[in-house]
Image (cartoon, rainbow, N blue to C red):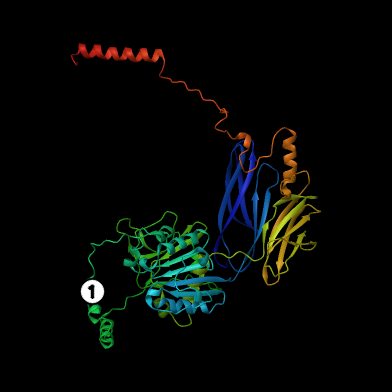
């Protein structure tokens, strides 16, 4: 997505006859984005490496990985990344208690067709407002992972612990582990403490403080609850007078700005975009206090003045952490609807903030047109097996290109549909050395690219990405009196209970010898004589 961060990940396989250093560089055109030095040990090495990259504006990013080993020329792997303006995101918005925030957030998302919002309220609230195609099917938060997988992001706002069953919490945890995203909005201290020790807390980036029954209740809250109980909900006029009096006595809480940590991670999430980009600073009215932040969490926003009295660290407002294949986030403030009301009507700051946060947290949808498996290197004359994916009803086209912009050579590659809908295979041989770009296109979808470095046939033929010749390997093993090993343990290696053990065991007890026994007896006798001499017996 535009103006976001993504992670470039690579795994380098290398062989070395002695310890040595391996320089690695990542380039974007003429700009070097990152560099490192990996340590090779003698023998086989498998070394992972990753680095964050800013996507920038929509378009294409050409990345080039250069690995300078013992060979004269660097080994190069190229990748083309498509940066999109927008993509479809399916959001399930579950609200446990009525709040003005849903109205503003839903209106913001409805303006953009790339967001599909399904909203449901907790049944205990007595509210039956729903929106979205899935809303008619859902009466409550699903308790199965299969139902949650219909969405890319789950937003839980003002939810109480007693509203979520154990099955619902376990389903949420499994959903995030499988790659989903969850945003937990919790502005109330008492409600946040009720989640301490529960399954939903395990997947979140923070630890909630435990409830303390000995805590002294606020006298104003107790008086309010007592008056509401006396009214009983039967006298509408009395309720109206009481609410009017309470509103007149209440004080408007001034809004507080978000503050950012000193290292300012993910600051692009708060960027307004456009020609004159600025940092959007959300404002909130109230927030809840968490006990601590987990080690894997990343703090995105903090309170500008409030600090933890024990550690001295600022209070956390927004934090995120990876959990399995997905990520979970906690926003300890209100839903920022007061911030929206304080801005001019033409301001889009609130809209931009929520949309960018939702897009970043949501599960990334796989590109409908993509390469499933391609070799990075090959040689002339070798057949390369290619596996691609595209929408089932589309007509994808694959072609190979090489050469410069003036003398580009383009070769169409025929695709054959596989047994699984939406997948195609192809076989291709390069007739010239150099870097070839495979381009996969389908009407109405962004194109996908893959690069293959074609070298001389004298290099290892296993670069052709062909499946192993199982029958040939089996005949080779049988010709020498062996057998082809599969995933199961060969029968000849199994030791039956009635057969003699293939491995014998011989034990030598170090203490069971005359020399050690005589030495111990001599020490014991010397102890008795000394005790008698010194009258210690």
In which image quadrant can residue 491 be found? top right
Q: In the image, 535: left or right of 276?
A: left
x and y percentages locating residue 30 in the rendered image: 65, 58
Using a 10 Å C-alpha cutoff, classify the residue at mark 1 as few (fewer than 14 neighbours), some (14 to 19) or many (20 or more): few
Q: Is residue 24 above or below residue 531?
A: below
Q: In the image, 301: left or right of 419?
A: left
x and y percentages locating residue 322 in the rendered image: 48, 58
Q: Is residue 7 above or below residue 160?
A: above
Query: In this view of the protein, can residue 123 be seen by the observer?
Result: yes
Q: In the image, 178: left or right of 242?
A: right
The quarter of the rendered structure image containing the C terminus is: top left
In which image quadrant can residue 413 be found? bottom right
Give the structural element (helix, strand or loop) at label 1.
Answer: helix
x and y percentages locating residue 393 in the rendered image: 70, 70
User: Which residue in the protein does label 1 denote?
Assistant: 220
The residue shown at (52%, 58%) is 325
x and y percentages locating residue 487 in the rendered image: 62, 43
Query: 216 and 261: which one is in front?
Result: 216
């Amino acid at each position: 997505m535009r103006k976001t961060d993504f992670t470039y990940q690579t795994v380098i396989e290398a062989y070395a006859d002695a310890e040595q250093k391996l320089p690695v560089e990542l380039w974007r055109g003429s700009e070097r984005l990152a560099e490192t030095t990996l340590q090779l040990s003698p023998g086989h090495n498998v070394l992972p490496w990753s680095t964050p990259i800013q996507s920038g504006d929509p378009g294409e990013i050409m990345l080039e990985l250069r690995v300078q080993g013992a060979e004269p020329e660097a080994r190069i792997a190229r990748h083309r990344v498509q940066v999109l303006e927008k993509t479809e995101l399916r959001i399930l918005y579950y609200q446990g208690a009525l709040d003005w925030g849903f109205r503003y957030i839903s209106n913001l998302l409805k303006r953009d067709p790339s967001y599909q919002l399904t909203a449901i309220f907790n049944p205990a609230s007595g509210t039956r407002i729903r929106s979205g195609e899935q809303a008619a099917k859902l009466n409550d938060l699903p308790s199965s992972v299969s139902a949650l997988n219909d969405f890319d992001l789950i937003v839980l706002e003002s939810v109480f612990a007693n509203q979520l069953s154990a099955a619902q919490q376990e389903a949420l945890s499994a959903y995030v582990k499988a790659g989903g995203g969850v945003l937990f909005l919790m502005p109330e201290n008492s409600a946040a403490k009720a989640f301490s020790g529960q399954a939903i807390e395990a997947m979140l980036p923070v630890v909630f403080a435990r409830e303390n029954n000995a805590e002294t209740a606020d006298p104003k809250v107790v008086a309010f609850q007592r008056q509401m109980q006396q009214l009983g909900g039967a006298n509408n006029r009395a309720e109206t007078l009481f609410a009017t009096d309470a509103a007149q006595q209440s004080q408007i809480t001034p809004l507080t700005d978000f503050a950012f940590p000193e290292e300012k991670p993910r600051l692009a999430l708060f960027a307004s975009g456009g020609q004159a980009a600025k940092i959007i600073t959300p404002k909130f009215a109230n927030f809840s206090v968490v006990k601590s932040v987990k080690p894997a969490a990343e703090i995105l926003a903090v309170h500008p003045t409030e600090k933890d009295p024990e550690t001295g660290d600022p209070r956390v407002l927004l934090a995120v952490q990876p959990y399995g294949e997905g990520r979970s986030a906690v926003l300890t403030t209100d839903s920022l609807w007061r911030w929206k009301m304080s801005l001019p009507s033409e301001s889009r700051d609130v809209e931009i903030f929520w949309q960018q946060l939702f897009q970043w947290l949501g599960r990334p949808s796989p590109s409908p047109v993509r390469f499933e498996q391609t070799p990075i290197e090959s040689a002339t004359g070798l057949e390369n097996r290619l596996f691609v994916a595209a929408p089932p009803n589309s007509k994808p086209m694959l072609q190979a290109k090489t050469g410069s912009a003036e003398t580009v050579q383009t070769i169409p590659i025929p695709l054959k549909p596989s047994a699984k809908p939406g997948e195609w295979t192809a076989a291709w041989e390069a007739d010239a050395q150099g870097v070839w770009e495979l381009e996969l296109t389908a009407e109405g979808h962004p194109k996908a690219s893959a690069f293959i470095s074609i070298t001389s046939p004298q290099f290892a033929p296993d670069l052709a990405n062909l499946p192993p010749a199982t029958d040939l390997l089996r005949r080779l093993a049988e010709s020498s009196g062996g057998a082809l090993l599969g995933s199961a343990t060969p029968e000849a290696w199994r030791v039956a209970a009635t057969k003699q053990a293939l491995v014998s065991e011989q034990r030598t007890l170090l203490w069971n010898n005359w020399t050690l026994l005589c030495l111990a007896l001599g020490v014991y006798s010397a102890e008795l004589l000394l005790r008698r001499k010194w009258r210690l017996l």
